[in-house]
Image (cartoon, rainbow, N blue to C red):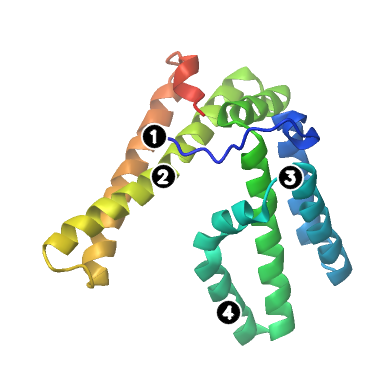
Amino acid sequence: MLISLYTPGNSPVHRTPAGLKIVLLFIFCTLLFLLQSWWFLAGAIAAVLAAYLLAKLSLTLAWQAMRPALWVLVLIFLVQLWLNDWQFGLYVVLRFAIMIVAATLLTLTSKTSEMIEGIERSVGKVFGADVAEKVGLAFSLSLRFIPMVRETYQEVREAQKARGLGRNWRALITPTMIRTLKSADDIAQAIDARSAGAPLAKDERHHD
């Protein structure tokens, strides 16, 4: 089952076409990397917060989406602290955090089917319909893959708990990685099969 963060609404942000929001997100994230300035970063944070208010969404939703990535952000900060200094580490972490929050706004205000259609239209204008269909399929399957990893971890965790291995991280990580890689291989084979020219049903690509 594909988990959707979409929150229904009638705000200007909700009504903006998903394709346009994807383009704006791409430009926004690109500028965050190109314009390395505390002033620009502060402006970007203010802009995203304003967008959440305009969309009438609680920042709690953004926090819930970002919370699983906190340990990654902490690791990034520690690496930058070792390589550079704490100011640069804080800048890098804030930059990634605001990108996650901005991307979450996209998923909160756009249905999955709308995002896939928007990506296909944008790619189709540049590379053609065939490439757009394959990119849309890859995006759809990737979205399905994310909750699949979580479900796999939960299944392995419950199974190892029953064996008394719930505190053994190797007993949790190894089977999870093996099953995840197997699922990733299945997804890659599905994309390869579609690349051979097999027709793609609309309901197979678009789910909310």
Q: Position of residue 125 (x, y in %)?
A: 73, 23
- Which label lies toward us, 1 or 3? 1
Residue 1: mark: 1
Q: Is residue 85 above or below residue 73?
A: below
Give residue 31's quadrant in the image: bottom right
Q: CA distance from mark 3 to mark 4?
A: 27 Å
Residue behind mark 2: 147
**If you read the primary sequence from the N terminus, does the residue marked by circle 3 or circle 4 appear first?**
3
Left or right of 42: which side holds 180? left
Q: Number of callouts in the render?
A: 4
Q: Residue furthest right?
A: 39
Query: Which is nearer the eye, 58 or 106?
Result: 58
Residue type at numbered disc 4 = Val
Q: Mark 1 and mark 2 in contact (Cβ < 8 Å)?
A: yes
**If you read the primary sequence from the N terminus, does the residue marked by circle 1 or circle 3 appear first?**
1
- Which label lies toward us, 3 or 2? 2
Q: CA distance from mark 1 to mark 3?
A: 26 Å
